[in-house]
Amino acid sequence: MHSERVHFDEIGYWSELKLEIVRKYAKAYSTILSRQPGLTHYYIDGFAGPGVHLSKRTGDFVPGSPLNALLIEPSFRHHFLIDLDGGRIAALRRMLGTHEEVSLYEGDCNRILVEEVLPRVRYEDYRRALCLLDPYGLQLDWKVIETAGRLGTIDLFLNFPIMDMNRNALWRDPERVTEHAVERMTRFWGDDSWRGAAYHSSAQEELFGSAATEKSPNSAIVQAFRRRLRDHAGFLNVPEPLAMRNSTNAVVYYLFFASRNATASDIIEDIFARYREGKPTH
């Protein structure tokens, strides 16, 4: 049994902007797809949370991504909301009441998405979906990303948790990283090619034949993952991701967008552009 007590995450300014970005794109996405006869479009959230957050700036409640999606007009045909925490799902259920257009899942989104939700979004059935994967750290399995990409029906927002990666797996001395952290990193990345992206030999070490390695900058790791989304997962359009920062201006994660649709990429590029050079003005 799960506890009825629910912890509401406190979110900073950039997390509020992320919710704003996803909401803006979801509005454009649903508007365009609603005009296409015979097409059905869904909203999918793999880490749905309890439905609301607390703003660090104001102390007020902030609607989470599931509530934002439910308020989009024209509406999505169905919403698939998943969370590992039963208390959060219970909070969502109390908040949403009975909605025929909402399915709530308690459990590991890696299994639920691959086995139960994504198979419903087949191209030949004229179904499409906007999917948000916003893990707290390295909880995501590459198989989910790859499955979404190969379907050819998914527009994907993805949290690439670079701070959690650096804290747990991408240490300057790779020999000191725990086996568990290595396994988590490999599951997220899909194979151990992350090592080649994360570490390199310096020119001096190569000159003298040293086997020592240096850690690559975050930018190199991010670009290597961007290539994986295109070349291995099959997303044809992966714009430059947006760096999301904390109160000290350190990058916490990168917000990726991936799609097979060039128009989708153009729309998100326009949205991202407002946030590229720091906080936007409203």
Image: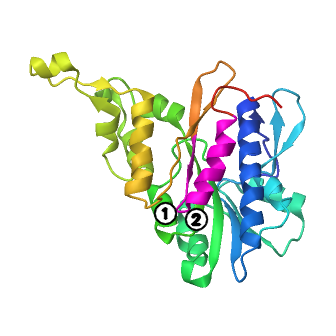
Q: Quadrant of the N terminus?
A: bottom right
Main secondary-structure element of the magenta-colored stretch: helix
Which residue type does callout 2 highlight? Ile
Residue type of the residue flagged with mark 1: Gly
Q: Quadrant of the C terminus?
A: top right
Q: Secondary structure at mark 1?
A: helix
Say left or right for 3 vs 203.
right
Residue bearing the label numbered 1: 149
- At 31% from the left edge and 46% from the top edge, which residue is drawn? 192
Q: What is the basis of the colouring in this image? A: rainbow
Write the start and end of the magenta stretch as one range.
Answer: 255-274
Percent of width and height locating residue 157:
61, 51
> Which quarter of the picture shows residue 76?
bottom right
The residue lying at 79 percent from left, 58 percent from top is: 69
Q: Which picture quadrant has residue 19?
A: top right
Mark 1 / mark 2, whichever is N-terminal? 1
The answer to whether the residues at label 1 and label 2 have Cβ atoms under 8 Å apart is yes
* Circle on res. 140: none
Task: Count residues near mark 2 (Cα–Cα under 10 Å), then give few for <14, some for 14-19, many for 20+.
Answer: many
**Residue bearing mark 2:** 154
Is residue 131 visible in the rendered structure shown here?
A: yes
Residue at 88% across / 30% down in the picture? 59
Q: Secondary structure beneath disc 2? A: strand
Place of residue 22 in the rendered image (x, y in percent of width and height, measured from the top left): 71, 49
Q: Residues within 10 Å of mark 1 (few under 14, many from 20)?
A: many
Q: Is residue 218 magenta?
A: no
Residue 35 against residue 232 in the figure, above or below: below
**Cα–Cα span, label 1 and label 2:** 7 Å
Would residue 73 appear left or right of 150 to someone viewing this image? right
